[in-house]
Amino acid sequence: MAYRQIPSTFTVKATNTPQPLFGSWVTAGPAAFVAGPCGMPVTLTLGTALTSGNDASMFHPGDEAYLIDPTGSTPLNAEPIRIQSVLNNTVTLGNQTDMSTQGQNPVTRFAHYVGAVGVGTFIMPRQMANNFLITLEDGGTGTFLYIGCSPSMTATAYRIFKLAKTATGVQPQYYSSAMFSPGNPFLMPEVFVVGAAGDIYNVSISID
């Protein structure tokens, strides 16, 4: 058993706006990324879901990852990608490892978006997990942190669980996916959260 190293807690960036449990969104990128497809590596600036403010530190060169456009985007696209390099709060996407109608090993196949959370395309490591544990840090302002299985989730739709806030200094609430048999059955890019802006949560990911 091992743990995915996550360098910081996470902050809910906008009230009632879904964000990846473990991931970020693209705040800036070249015109080719927005227009799509991309045949050459592109460098993207990420958001600040990590409380430390450096979301790119979630990624490592060679990582497989996903781009998923926020709900309501037109068009709405999703695709696998590969992280070529990481620098400060940017990641550079390298060529994918398959064939497509856009040519051999494109960087991206589709158009995507840049902007704040809920506008910019989500970017998430393709991490399979044996178990994940979420703690809603004490002293939050929102009544609940909602955990769901879709970028379209709300407080009631596509919800898995909800964690109630606790006062400062009180042991926080937590959710554990509680799967410790062999294998890594959970795909982390499927998990999203909704809460109150400024509330902080922690994620622990166990890997076989």
Image (cartoon, rainbow, N blue to C red):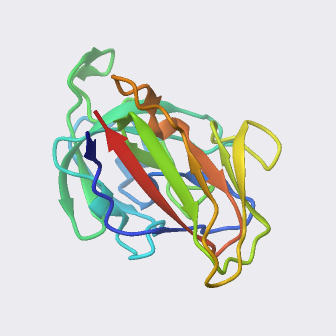
110, above or below 167, in the image? above
Who's the residue at 20% across and 34% down the image? 95
- Across and down, in percent, residue 44 comes to 33, 57
Quadrant of res 173: bottom right
- Across and down, in percent, residue 121 comes to 51, 48
Rendered-image quadrant of the C terminus: top left
143, above or below 44, in the image? below
Quadrant of res 93: top left
Rendered-image quadrant of the N terminus: top left
Who's the residue at 47% across and 39% down the image? 189
131, above or below 23, in the image? above
Quadrant of res 148: top right
| Residue 180 visible in rendering | yes
92, above or below 172, in the image? above
**Between residues 57 and 174, which one lies in front from this camera angle?**
174
Q: Left or right: where does residue 63 sit relative to residue 153?
A: left
Who's the residue at 49% across and 32% down the image? 78
